[in-house]
């Protein structure tokens, strides 16, 4: 009888041990699935970016990519809204120091780098976005510029951009403005895309005023 009881106890212990091992295995599997799902979400991005590097990088105002953004810039509100937007860029790029800005990496051997370029007038500058493939420079575009005191009215030129790292697309608006009569002349509004080759190409042209585009050339504003 004692021998029988021992056998029963041993069987019970084996069953309990198996259940614990099974539950432990299930928990490990579940954890792996969650981790893999997280990785899958990251890999769905056009640029698989290490977001820890973005603390000191201003990627622009995301409102540029919102639906009806351009349509909402009416004659009465356009100047005020854009002035407020531009102040956001001025604030973020005021103390921009090139050496302190890390590159933005991706899983496609593409890297992006922002650079601040000063003009002869040190109060005026532009922010340029460079793309690299395998550490070789491929392309660049003017990401931000605010030129004031042009020779003729409208005396200000502004280029605002927003970089969406999830899809590698860049939204831009370029315009002339006059603080005298608070008017705005829209030059360009559209979207560009960073290709797998590192090239930056126009993806969607929403608005272009060719006559004001000519004025850019006259004022030597082309990048």
Image: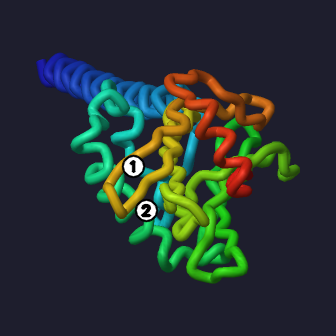
Instruction: Write down the quadrant of residue 208 in the picture.
Output: top right
| 180 relative to 22, above or below | below
Whether residue 165 is visible: no
Label 1 CA crowd tier, 10 Å (few <14, some 14–19, many 20+): some
Label 2 CA crowd tier, 10 Å (few <14, some 14–19, many 20+): some
Q: Position of residue 125 (x, y in %)?
A: 62, 70
* Disc assigned to residue 19: none
Query: Foreground residue, 129 or 165?
Result: 129
Q: Position of residue 205 (x, y in %)?
A: 57, 23
Instruction: Write down the quadrant of residue 27 in the picture.
Output: top left
Task: Quickly name the residue at label 2.
Answer: 89
| 160 relative to 193, above or below | below
Quarter of the image containing the N terminus?
top left
Q: Residue at x 54, y 70 (%)?
A: 149
Q: Are marks 1 and 2 in contact (CB under 8 Å)?
A: yes
87 displayed left or right of 168? left
212 displayed left or right of 32? right
Which of the two labelled residues, at mark 1 and mark 2, occupies the earlier sequence position? Answer: 1
Query: Foreground residue, 124 or 163?
Result: 124
Task: Quickly name the residue at label 1.
Answer: 61
């Amino acid at each position: 009888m004692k021998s029988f009881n021992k056998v029963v106890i041993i069987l019970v212990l084996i069953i309990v041990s198996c259940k614990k091992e099974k539950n432990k295995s299930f928990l490990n599997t579940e954890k792996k699935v969650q981790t893999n799902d997280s990785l899958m979400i990251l890999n769905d991005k056009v640029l698989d970016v290490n977001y820890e590097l973005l603390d000191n990088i201003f990627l622009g105002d995301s409102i540029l990519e919102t639906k009806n953004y351009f349509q909402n810039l009416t004659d009465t509100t356009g100047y005020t809204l854009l002035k407020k937007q531009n102040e956001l860029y001025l604030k973020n790029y005021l103390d921009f120091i090139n050496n302190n800005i890390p590159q933005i990496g991706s899983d496609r051997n593409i890297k992006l780098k922002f650079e601040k370029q000063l003009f002869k007038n040190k109060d005026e500058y532009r922010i340029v976005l460079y793309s690299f493939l395998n550490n070789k420079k491929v392309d660049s575009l003017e990401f931000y510029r605010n030129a004031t005191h042009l020779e003729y009215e409208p005396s200000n030129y502004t280029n605002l951009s927003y970089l969406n790292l999830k899809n590698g697309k860049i939204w831009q608006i370029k315009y002339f403005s006059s603080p005298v009569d608070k008017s705005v002349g829209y030059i360009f509004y559209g979207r560009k895309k960073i290709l797998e080759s590192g090239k930056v190409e126009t993806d969607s042209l929403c608005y272009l005023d060719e006559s004001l585009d000519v004025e850019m050339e006259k004022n030597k504003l082309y990048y």
